[in-house]
């Protein structure tokens, strides 16, 4: 789909979209089209009881009067104008794209001028609207036959966003388009089946995606990990036929000697639970237990694509957790790279073991100013938050606040949970320095975060538990059903706060 920006003008062909604010207030573009059609829009609003211009509402008018080149006019509700921010603008674009997909439109134009009262500049609004439309246009059909692909709805070949100051909008969109490319990489990874995506192929796919971006890549294999003493990660991997890998991606966009930021992702390409085997029902979902690693990979592509002026380390621990004859047993004691020992009481609490060694390695090797990890870590976070917010844990209030602000700005919302010595003591162990789970049924997400905290030292750190937000069972405005890439936009916005 080609997205372009232009001065406001009547479209030459295809679908035309106009904006309507809550209460039925027409934008300038909508007023001109209403006049051109002899008041058809006004009449539709009077008789359309289900459409009032609220955010997310749409109304489609077929074959509008006196606009022979236009097949349909789409009335796009944008809600209360004073409350429209960047996230709302993107949602509006995504809502429009859903309609265009349903109409199988081959070309579309949206008159993106807002009614009076908007706090967003016209170019910013237009760019964000186009960004949302692009995000919603994503589809994963790699493994469908040609016949099935032919039946599927595809985005229009062209989308023209008509706005005041199209040059400004185009400039704003360039960076957003780079972020969208990162989002698409993450979604592609999360969608992949586990027989085709395992540590080796994960590394190969991401390496290919990052070619010629300027990102430096290093891969640690099992031999190197053993030499480094990464017994926690290696213990998880020992039941799989596929060897583990740690992939380090380095973007050097800042000053040469400036300490980097670091983002770390859990990459369990399939999680059977190991010998603590998961129930068969919904085990197929565990193909996306590598969601954190997918987000880190997509983020790095986004940062390189928009030439972010900051140094960032992306590190992902890639393993498969399987129950063969060599698999880790409940009751095993492993020694992490940090030297701390861990009694593994539950082999299905494996993500924290992987992250323990990767966090310590990144902290010791790169001395980052901040570390943020992402992991589909606990089912308990879904019990607490459902699928709307991700859990946030941090040892630094300023970092936590910055992440919350970025979450709100991008629509990828976070809810902060406590860390406390009382929770940390729940991990105390008789045979080792710690156990890998707390008491059954008690504060599962918090004790998991407390476990990770033991491997970050004094570094400013945050943990995002994205178990409930990595996959969506339904379409959302900018996120089609499936892999969401939750975290790419959030962290890109957070990183931007460090750029000079």
Image (spheres, helix red, strand yellow):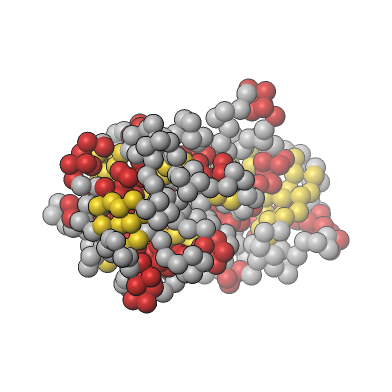
Kindly identify the residue that appears in the image at 27 percent across and 63 percent down.
433
**Residue 268: % across, % down:** 41, 44
**Residue farthest toward the top in the current orientation of the protein:** 146
In the rendered view of the protein, which quadrant contains the N terminus?
A: top right
**Residue 133: % across, % down:** 57, 48
In the rendered view of the protein, which quadrant contains the C terminus?
A: bottom left
**Residue farthest toward the left in the current orientation of the protein:** 257
Kindly identify the residue that appears in the image at 37 percent across and 53 percent down.
331
Residue 274 can be seen, yes or no: yes
Kindly identify the residue that appears in the image at 28 percent across and 51 percent down.
334
Residue 261 can be seen, yes or no: no
* Front residue of this view, candidates 485 and 273: 273
Q: How many marks?
A: 0
Tell me if residue 51 comes above or below residue 333 in the rendering: below
* Front residue of this view, candidates 69 and 275: 275
**Residue 249: % across, % down:** 28, 44
Q: Is residue 390 left or right of residue 236?
A: right
* Front residue of this view, candidates 327 and 308: 327
Q: Is residue 236 left or right of residue 195?
A: left
* Front residue of this view, candidates 96 and 359: 359
**Residue farthest toward the right in the current orientation of the protein:** 47
Kindly identify the residue that appears in the image at 18 percent across and 45 percent down.
228
């Amino acid at each position: 789909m080609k997205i372009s920006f232009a001065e406001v003008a009547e479209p030459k062909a295809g679908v035309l979209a106009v904006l309507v604010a809550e209460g039925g207030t027409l934008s300038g573009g909508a007023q001109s089209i209403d006049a051109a059609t002899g008041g058809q829009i006004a009449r539709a609003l009077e008789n359309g009881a289900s459409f009032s211009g609220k955010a997310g509402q749409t109304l489609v008018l077929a074959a509008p009067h006196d606009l022979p080149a236009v097949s349909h006019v789409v009335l796009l509700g944008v809600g209360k104008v004073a409350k429209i921010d960047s996230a709302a603008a993107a949602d509006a674009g995504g809502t429009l794209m859903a309609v265009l997909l349903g109409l199988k439109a081959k070309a579309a134009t949206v008159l993106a001028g807002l009614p009076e009262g908007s706090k967003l500049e016209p170019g910013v609004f237009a760019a964000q609207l186009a960004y949302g439309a692009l995000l919603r246009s994503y589809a994963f059909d790699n493994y469908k036959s040609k016949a099935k692909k032919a039946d599927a709805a595809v985005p229009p070949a062209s989308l023209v966003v008509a706005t005041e100051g199209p040059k400004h909008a185009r400039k704003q969109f360039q960076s957003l388009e780079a972020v969208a490319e990162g989002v698409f990489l993450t979604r592609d990874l999360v969608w992949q089946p586990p027989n085709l995506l395992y540590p080796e192929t994960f590394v190969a796919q991401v390496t290919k995606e990052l070619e010629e971006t300027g990102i430096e890549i290093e891969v640690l294999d099992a031999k190197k990990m053993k030499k480094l003493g990464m017994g926690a990660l290696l213990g998880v991997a020992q039941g799989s036929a596929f060897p583990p890998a740690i992939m380090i991606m380095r973007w050097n966009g800042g000053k040469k000697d400036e300490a980097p930021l670091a983002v770390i992702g859990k990459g369990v390409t399939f999680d059977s639970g190991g010998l603590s085997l998961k129930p068969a029902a919904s085990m197929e979902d565990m193909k996306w237990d590598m969601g954190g690693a997918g987000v880190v990979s997509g983020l790095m592509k986004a940062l390189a694509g928009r030439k972010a002026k900051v140094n960032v380390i992306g590190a992902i621990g890639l393993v498969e957790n399987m129950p063969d004859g060599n698999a880790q047993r409940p009751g095993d004691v492993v020694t992490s790279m940090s030297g701390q020992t861990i009694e593994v009481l539950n082999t299905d609490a494996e993500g924290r073991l992987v992250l323990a060694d990767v966090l310590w390695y990144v902290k010791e090797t790169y001395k980052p100013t901040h570390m943020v990890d992402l992991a589909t870590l606990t089912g308990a976070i879904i019990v607490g938050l459902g699928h709307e917010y991700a859990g946030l844990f941090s040892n630094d209030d300023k970092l936590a606040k910055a992440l919350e602000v970025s979450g709100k700005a991008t629509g990828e919302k976070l809810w902060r949970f406590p860390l406390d010595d009382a929770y940390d003591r729940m991990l105390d162990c008789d045979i080792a320095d710690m156990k890998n789970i707390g008491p059954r049924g008690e504060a599962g997400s918090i004790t998991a975060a407390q476990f990770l905290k033991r491997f970050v030292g004094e570094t400013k750190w945050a943990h995002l538990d994205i178990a409930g937000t990595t996959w969506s069972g339904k379409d959302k405005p900018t996120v089609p059903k499936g892999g969401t890439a939750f975290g790419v936009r959030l962290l890109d916005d957070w990183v931007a706060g460090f750029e000079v």
